[in-house]
Image: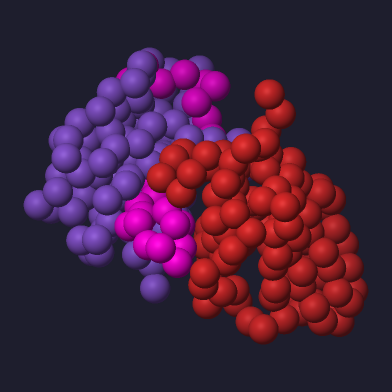
Chain colours: A purple, B red
Amino acid sequence: QQQVKQSPQSLIVQKGGISIINCAYENTAFDYFPWYQQFPGKGPALLIAIRPDVSEKKEGRFTISFNKSAKQFSLHIMDSQPGDSATYFCAASPYNSNSGYALNFGKGTSLLVTP
Amino acid sequence: GAGVSQSPSNKVTEKGKDVELRCDPISGHTALYWYRQSLGQGLEFLIYFQGNSAPDKSGLPSDRFSAERTGGSVSTLTIQRTQQEDSAVYLCASSWTKYNEQFFGPGTRLTVL
């Protein structure tokens, strides 16, 4: 059962545009929400993460918006560049003594930024 | 410093053979996680170690899968009597403590013929 639902599955954005990827969850025990970027043949790399006590976090061109009541969070990539073309995964995790912060991942969004 | 390393990077095996996948976490990281990435299932959590201890093995897909960690460092994931559905990329991640950012290795691509 997919605990984190991610959309869209794929996204094409022009260079300089804004890329927006959305995720939704049901488990109210989740308290850590990271976004990962993955290039072909590489492992996922953490982009930015948020905890539910804040509604927005910005790091450079990347912003997470978090809506606790709606149980939704999204990644905005401002001024998208061709080098941002990759697969993006949202994830969510509760802390559990048996599984640590084991991540529940969305299915991923394949982003293509055209020149 | 060095990141998380995994070996082999690619492994092709025949159905029914056993395979062993290795993860070298970042030095000093006490928490270690194994995940599996496949087209059908996406990224799924398999098992977590805090030090050498894995409190819960229920995330492992079947009893053909086992994992251990020794010396609070290297971990091995063993798959016995491999099946075609085991074909996937197996990813390892480590973090300073259970609360911190997870750093992923490049993965081992397992193909079972």
Considering the whole magenta stretch, tell me its main secondary structure: loop
The residue segment tinted magenta is A78-102
Percent across and percent down for residue B86 are 71, 72
- The residue at the far left in this view is A69
Residue B101 can be seen, yes or no: yes
- Name the residue rendered at 40%, 40% in the picture: A35
Q: Does the magenta segment cover residue A94?
A: yes
A75 or A113: nearer the viewer: A75
Q: Is residue A45 above or below residue B23?
A: above
Horizontal and vertical percent position of residue A54: 17, 35
Say which residue appears at 80% left-offset and 78% top-offset.
B80
Whether residue B6 appears in magenta in the rendering, the answer is: no
Horizontal side of A103 relative to B49 (left or right) equals left
Number of on-image labels: 0
Residue at left offset 57%, top offset 59%: B49
Residue extending furthest front? B71
Quadrant (top left, top right, bottom left, bottom right) of the N terminus of chain A: bottom left
Residue B17 screen position, x and y as percent? 89, 77
Residue A83, located in which quarter of the rendered image?
A: top right
Q: Quadrant of residue A26?
A: bottom left
In the image, residue B108 sits, relative to residue A55, either above or below, namely: below
Taking the spot 86% from the left edge, 82% from the top edge, the residue there is B16
Is residue A89 visible from the viewing direction of this image? no
Return the residue nearer the eye: A14 or B7: B7
| Image vertical order of residue A24 relative to residue B27, above or below | below
- Relative height, residue B66 to residue B77 (above, below): below
